[in-house]
Every structure is written in structure tokens, then in C-alpha cells.
Amino acid sequence: MDNRDEIIRTQMDVISTLINNNLRNIGADLWGDDLPGKPAETKQKEKKPEVQAAKPQQTAQQPQQEAEQETPPEDINDLKAELNELIGLDGIKKEVNNLINMVTIHKLRQQNDLKTVDMSLHMVFTGNPGTGKTMIARIMSRIYKSLGILTKGHLVEVDRSGLVAGYVGQTATKTSAVIEKALGGVLFIDEAYALNSRSENDFGQEAIDTLLKAMEDHRDDLVVIVAGYDGLMEKFIHSNPGLESRFNRYLHFDDYTIDEMAAILDLNLRKGQYKLDDAGREAARQYIIDANTSSISFGNARGVRNVFERLLVAQANRLAQSANVSKEDLMLITAEDVKAARESDEKMIASERAQQSLIQSAEDTIAELTALSKNIPVKLEPPEKA
């Protein structure tokens, strides 16, 4: 029996069990719990007394939470230099520099008792995965601290799962805990559009409402950045008047060009003290081109990072076969390594596709069997009394 048959057999057993349980539940609803063959001990379950472990008493010398060590603000010119050294992101760099200038002048007007226009510092980042959204959010948190906007300048990154709970009343508590952790810094919500699924029994709206209230209550020491795909983020922001009023600053992150991705690979190599020979460099560039063209999930800089890690694995496998390995050998990555990395990558992709195909086949079979089970006529008769 192959894997597919085994999965189908298992799922048929599960469906059969579910059908039997459903029939028993229907019978119980019609004729009560006194069904033949039902063990008496299952009618009532004894509740065991809960035992709560004693907690050590806290003293005045033991604060509930250790105070976070405050770090001094960084020099804004150093942060600008760090931003401008990033590969690509020309449009983002310009927008961030504009924002720095606006905030600087805003603060100066406040210090000179001049009127200031309310300025929203919350932002919407749009673009494909791997285009640097999280990296820029982290830099922005440090910039805001340097400018005196935030007290801590740290970044808290979450997605829907970090904010939304599965039961009524828990989402507000879960979201509030994340907000509390982010106070004094930037709360970065990736794929924020997932909060607005509008499905039945979904608590995403509760998270949004809690977030909007916190943005108002803590507007002087909390910045929220939401991120995701272009069209989906546009719909998300315009789905709620509260979101529209608080998020009016959009930064779009373009995909990296091939030259920029090749430069990112070179940067990773230099930082790791590796280098490509001439043939390896050309092969690596072609590797990036083909991976970026053939896969929608390549992921820009994230995909380049994966290529870099696979090159290291291929080099390690090659050097492990050598008796004598020099320092030069440890640094050099060759065209042979690039070829081995590509072959390994292709095998892994093929394996993932085969697994996905198997899972999809099993899911289709389950759906067919479930539909079939709903059409089976069921004749319910009262149980015979003993």
C-alpha cells in the first residue's frame, strides 16, 4: 500500500468515526442519554480539585519585572548614513529622509512655541516579501528615538497570530499585551490585512478596535507600522474609517533588480569572509536570475539569503572530502559549488511539489467522501428498552 492509499484509508476511518458519533449525538438529542451500551461512568465526570502551586512572595527588593536598560539615542547623521548605505530602496530612502526633516522641523517649532500641524507618524508599508520592510521598520524605530519621538526605540514584530485569539474576549487581552510590550517603540504588524478577514466567528475586528484605541491613548509614545501586499493593504486601510484617519503615510517597496540582488549576495559573502571565483560569480548570477524567474516565492533579498546559505552547504560538502583544507579553500566558493547548490535546490522544490500534490489529492478525496456521507440516508429508530 503506497502513501496515498494509506492516507485515504486513514481519512475514511476518521470520517466513519465522525458519522457514527454524529448519529449517536442525534439519537441522544431525540431520546435522551439512556442509550443502550453507554457506560454509566461517562455520564458524569468527577471534577478533580485543582492544585495551585504556591508562588514565592515578592519583596520590595524584587521588582516584578527587571527595568529595561535604557540606551542613549543614536546620532541622527549616523542613522542617515546607515540608511543610505543600504542596497537599492532609493525611493524609500528619499521618503525616510523627507520624514526625518519634517519631524526635525516639527520639534523645533514646538521648542520655539510656534503652532504645529498634527502629523501622523504611523505608516503603511506595501510591497512583496523580501523587499526590506522589516529592516526599514527597525531603522525607523531607532530614528524616532534619536529625534525624541519615542522613549525606547525598539521594534516589536507580530502578525495576525500574535494578536488574534480563538475565543471570545481573549483577543483584546492578547492584543493589549503586545501593545504594552511595544510602548516606547514601533509595533510592526506584517500581513496586517489578515486581521480583516470578515469571516464568521472571526475576532480580527476586535484586534483592530483594540489597536485603534491604543494608538489614540498612547499617541505620544507608540508608532504602528502595518505591512503587506499592495492591493490587499489598500483594501484593509479603506475598510475602516479609524484606520484611514490614522494611516495616511504610504511607503511602497519595489522589487530588487537582478543587479541589486547580485550586490546583496556579494555583501553577504564579504560579511561572511567568502569570495566567488570568476566562473562562480557568473554562475551565481545566473542562479539568481533563474530562481527569480521560475518561482513566485523567491522573495527578493530573502531569496538571495537562501541562495547564499545553500552555497555554504555545497562548499562544506565539497571541502569535507578533502584531506588538506587551506585558509584560501575555506574562503573560496566555486562554480562547482553553485552547480551543486542549484541541483540540491531543484530536488528540494520537486520534493515539496510532490508532497503538495499528495496532500491536495488526499484533501480532494476527503471532500468527496464527506459529500458522499451527507447523501447517505439515515433511518433512526428508538433503542430497544432492556
Image (tube, helix red, strand yellow):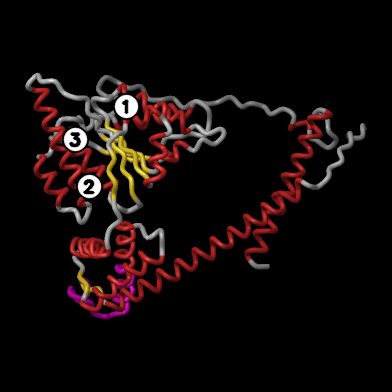
**Label placed on residue 215:** 1
Residue 322, above or below 203: below
Q: How many marks?
A: 3
Residue 265, above or below 158: below
Whether residue 15 appears in magenta in the rendering, the answer is no
Q: Name the residue under label 2.
A: 92
Marks 3 and 1, the one that precedes in the sequence: 3
Residue 223 pos. (x, y %): 27, 32
Residue at image location 80% in from the left, 35% down from the top: 38
Residue 260, above or below 61: below
Q: Name the residue under label 3.
A: 144
Marks 2 and 3, the one that precedes in the sequence: 2
Residue numbers of the magenta segment:
311-331
Q: Residue furthest bottom?
A: 323
Check disc 1 and report its element: helix, strand or loop.
helix
Residue 104 pos. (x, y %): 12, 33
Marks 2 and 1, the one that precedes in the sequence: 2
Q: What residue type is labelled 2?
A: Ile
User: Distance of mark 2 from mark 1, alpha carbons?
Assistant: 24 Å
